[in-house]
Image (tube, helix red, strand yellow):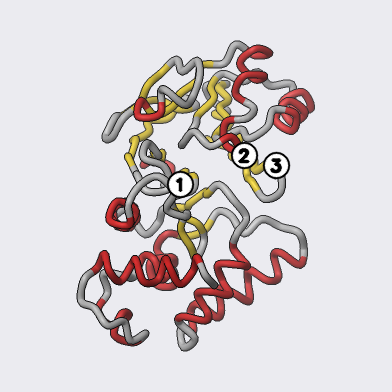
């Protein structure tokens, strides 16, 4: 059995602490800072075995050094970012199958937000850690990669099973919801999701995890290959990449 604890950090980051109860293994995903992780571990009396990074940005790696020093944890991170993430113990690349918290995990290279960004998919638990590639009702900004790369990365994640529960790097959901509603105002499933999102945020609850199956129907960035959707929002292109680019640029300026 796997237990996933959500730790809020910095202004809007989420850090994920995975606990394999049977094997007594604990891993942390994207520790942007160390103090809240240390406190959680100390309160539970747990040791930290593994640190996992999706990409090199400091708000996802800022706690690496301190946590490694305190716990002697093994650092798992993308080989593509070895020049930007220090003291990596296990280098991972696309399609690798590795162990995280004692669970078989597939590595998916998802360039776009950064060139070396990876996501981690745990098939037997139907869990995806999407970092800053896929957000609830949104996607990451394209900083280092190209629009083509980001579009391809998102469609790669779209191919995962509908049952997948997705844990992303930030609580951007209400902002993403406003844009999604603006661009797709007649989507009833989207409006229902937004109502649920607003209740959770009013109660100061995370909107994470979210269902990938539902996301395929309400996230505009996962629907750029759906001609019915692109026609309904009157995009003047039949190109999937161009459709993505238009929507991403609209979001950047929203």
Q: Which mark is residue 176?
A: none
| Badge 1 element | strand
Q: Quadrant of residue 197?
A: bottom right
**Residue 107 image point, x, y percent:** 34, 35
Q: Position of residue 13 (x, y in %)?
A: 64, 46
| Upstream in sequence: badge 1 or badge 3 | 3
Residue tagged by mark 1? 130
Mark 1 or mark 2, earlier in chain: 2
Q: Are marks 2 and 3 in contact (CB under 8 Å)?
A: yes
Q: Where residue 9 is drawn, which disc sits there?
A: 3
Is 173 positioned to the left or the right of 217 in the image? right
The residue located at (68%, 21%) in the rendering is 46
In the rendered structure, find residue 15 and report the number of the disc placed on it. Answer: 2
For label 3, the crowd category at 10 Å Cα-Cα, with few meaning under 14, some 14 to 19 and many 20 or more, is some
**Within-10-Å neighbours for mark 2: few <14, some 14–19, many 20+:** many
Name the residue at 31% across, 79% down. Answer: 230
Most foreground residue, 113 or 1: 113
The image quarter containing residue 14 is top right
| Contact (Cβ within 8 Å) of mark 1 with mark 2 | no
Depth check: give the residue in front, 251 or 33: 251
Q: Is residue 250 toward the left or the right of residue 96 in the image?
A: right
**Would you place residue 78 above or below residue 75 in this image?**
below
């Amino acid at each position: 059995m796997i237990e996933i604890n959500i730790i809020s950090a910095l202004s809007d980051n989420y850090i994920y602490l995975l606990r394999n109860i049977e094997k007594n293994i604990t891993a942390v995903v994207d520790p942007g800072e160390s103090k809240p992780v240390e406190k959680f571990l100390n309160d539970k009396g747990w040791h930290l075995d593994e640190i996992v990074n999706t990409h090199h940005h400091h708000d996802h790696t800022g706690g690496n050094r301190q946590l490694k020093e305190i716990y002697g944890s093994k650092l798992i991170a993308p080989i593509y970012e070895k020049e930007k993430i220090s003291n990596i113990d296990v280098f991972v690349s696309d399609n690798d199958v590795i162990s995280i918290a004692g669970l078989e995990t597939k590595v998916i290279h998802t360039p776009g937000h950064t060139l070396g960004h990876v996501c981690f998919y745990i098939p037997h638990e139907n869990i995806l850690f999407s970092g800053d590639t896929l957000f609830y009702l949104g996607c990451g900004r394209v900083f280092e990669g190209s629009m083509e790369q980001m579009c391809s990365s998102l469609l790669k994640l779209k191919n995962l099973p509908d049952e997948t529960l997705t844990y992303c790097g930030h609580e951007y959901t209400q902002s993403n919801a406003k844009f999604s509603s603006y661009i797709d105002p007649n989507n009833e499933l989207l409006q229902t999701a937004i109502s649920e999102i607003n209740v959770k945020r009013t109660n100061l609850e995370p909107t994470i995890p979210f269902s990938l199956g539902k996301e395929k129907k309400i996230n505009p960035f996962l629907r750029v290959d759906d001609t019915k959707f692109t026609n309904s929002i009157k995009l003047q292109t039949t190109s999937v990449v161009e459709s993505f680019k238009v929507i991403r640029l609209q979001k950047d300026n929203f």
